[in-house]
Every structure is written in C-alpha cells, then in structure tokens.
Amino acid sequence: MLEVAGLGELEERAYRLLVRAGEADAPSLAEELGLTAEAADAALTGMRSAGLVREVTPGRFAPVAPDVALGPRLVRRQETIDWARQAVEQLAEEYRASARRRTPTAWSRCCRAGRRCASRSGTSRTAPRRRSSTSAGPGTW
C-alpha cells in the first residue's frame, strides 16, 4: 500500500512493526517478520537512510512519525501526478485542435460531392463541376 510513498513490501512491513512496537533491534525485527538477521539489518539501514527510522541507542531503531517521514514523499508524488495530469490535458487539447484541422467541414464535404449545401453565411452554394476528361472542348465543364 505504501509503495506510492516509495516503500517496498519489506520496508513497509518493518516500518509498520516499528510503529506498533515503538522501537526494535534487527534480531527482534527479523524474528517478528520471519527474516534473516542480514535482511532485517539491510531493511533498517535502508529505512534509516530514507529517513523513516532513527537509531535511538546503538542497534535499536524507532520509527520517525509517519506524517514527517512519508508526508513529503507523498507531496512530491502528488506534484508529479499533477504535472503529468497537466501534460495529458495539454496533449489532449493539442489532439483536439489537430483533429479539428484534419476533419473537413460539412460544407467542404458536400461541395466535393457536387451537392447543394448551405455555407456558413447562410446562402446556398453549389460546388463547381469538375471538368471531365471526355468533355467536348476547351472551356466546357
């Protein structure tokens, strides 16, 4: 659940245990989580460098308050999501503008078909007929 804040599964489990217990050392963390002592020590070292725990006495660690440890991470993630959302909105607008330029208007579609249609000014127009390659002579349509 806290991977959004940058915690892996092991770090989250260890951090939750420390929040409940108040403090722990690597051997007791390993025993509670079913880890090797080396894995528990690595998790504590990683969490310490990430600012999630602090060493209260040599070898014993306590959690940093969740709002202090995780709040800034979540704010940064939210900012990143907001920037991405703005980029998507900008791309969507560019897409719509491009689609409008690519889509022929109703007038141009009907006039190309040689039908009578109303122009934007409200008057009717008929598209000029194309010159046939089998026409009688120059200047005839």
Image (cartoon, grey):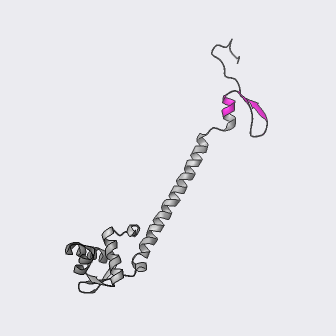
Residue extending farthest top: 136
Asked if residue 51 can be seen in this view, the reply is no
Q: Is residue 81 left or right of residue 126?
A: left
Q: Quadrant of the N terminus?
A: bottom left
Image height of 83 relative to 128, above or below: below
Q: Is residue 109 left or right of residue 79?
A: right
Which portion, as a residue range, is magenta? 109-128
Give percent across and percent down for residue 22. Answer: 34, 85
- Camera-nearest residue between 95 and 46: 46
Q: Quadrant of residue 34?
A: bottom left
Give percent across and percent down for residue 76. Answer: 44, 70
Asked if residue 131 can be seen in this view, the reply is yes
Give percent across and percent down for residue 102. Answer: 58, 40
Image height of 119 relative to 76, above or below: above
Is residue 78 within the magenta segment?
no
Q: Quadrant of the C terminus?
A: top right
Q: Residue at x 66, y 33 (%)?
A: 109
Q: Residue at x 47, y 68 (%)?
A: 78
Is residue 126 within the magenta segment?
yes
Image height of 127 relative to 90, above or below: above
Give percent across and percent down for residue 88. Answer: 51, 56
- Camera-nearest residue between 56 and 108: 56
Residue extending farthest right: 123
Q: Quadrant of residue 132?
A: top right
Q: Residue at x 51, y 57 (%)?
A: 87
- Camera-nearest residue between 112 and 131: 112
Numbered-mark total: 0
